[in-house]
Image (cartoon, rainbow, N blue to C red):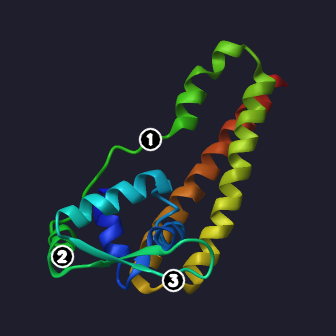
Amino acid sequence: MSLEHVLLGLLRRPASGYDLKREFEERVGQFWSAPLSQIYPTLRRLEERGLLRSHEEPSTRGPARRVYERTLDGWEELREWLESGPVRGRERFPHLAQLSFLGELQSPETTVEFLAGLRSRWVADLERLRKLAATAAFHAELGLRLRARLLEAQLVWADDVLQSLQAARG
């Protein structure tokens, strides 16, 4: 998946970069992230390629804002991407990298704290996902439902590991 395609998908109606960031968080933020520092240059590249056009609009706060909209070529690019079949990426899980080196500390307590913290975040993420899925459109809900199942599996794993650590500690 590319950020370009995600932005093209989000631009169903004209929006500013800030508006897109907010919608990005709501629609795909559970499985994809992009800061404004990536969004704005990507929007400019899409416009240079003729996939977007933009204009300035007055803002109720501060300077004028640039509003983007998809062109017909942008729609065609999005359509081709959607019809090309599933795209699998190489996801990054920084917490797994941390976990793989946690043994260096030789502290079972730190490992338990790390896993408990991770579990706590997953519980909060799952609760937020379920609320989003309850009001999401069908296709958006499909992705949210899959992400929820993955979180449920991660919680089962965390509970198993924490239980094993507790048993090993006596």
Q: Mark 3 points at which residue?
A: 136
Mark 1 or mark 2: which is in front?
A: 2
Residue 3 seen in this snapshot? no
Q: What element carries label 2?
A: helix
Q: Distance between the residues labelled 3 and 2?
A: 21 Å
Q: Name the residue under label 1.
A: 92
Q: How far apart are marks 1 and 2 (CA)?
A: 27 Å
In the rendered structure, the answer to whether residue 11 lies left or right of residue 107 reads left
| Nearer to the camera, 139 or 48 | 48
Rendered location of residue 67, percent (x, y): 40, 77
Q: Quadrant of the C terminus?
A: top right
Crowdedness of circle 3 by 10 Å Cα count: few (<14), some, many (20+)? some
In the rendered structure, the answer to whether residue 10 lies left or right of residue 148 reads left
Mark 3 or mark 2: which is in front?
A: 2
* Type of amino acid at the residue the image marks with label 1: Arg
Do the numbered discs 1 and 3 sit on residues whose CB atoms are within 8 Å?
no
The residue depicted at 74 percent of the width and 38 percent of the height is 163
Q: If you read the primary sequence from the N terminus, does the residue marked by circle 1 or circle 3 appear first?
A: 1
Rendered location of residue 90, percent (x, y): 34, 43
Residue 106 seen in this snapshot? yes
Q: Is residue 18 above or below residue 160?
A: below
Rendered location of residue 66, percent (x, y): 42, 73
Q: Mark 2 points at which residue?
A: 79
* Type of amino acid at the residue the image marks with label 3: Ala
Q: How far apart are marks 1 and 3 (CA)?
A: 26 Å
Q: In which quarter of the image is the N terminus?
A: bottom left
The residue depicted at 49 percent of the width and 70 percent of the height is 144
Q: Determine the image quadrant of residue 117.
A: top right
The residue depicted at 14 percent of the width and 76 percent of the height is 73
Do the numbered discs 3 and 2 sit on residues whose CB atoms are within 8 Å?
no
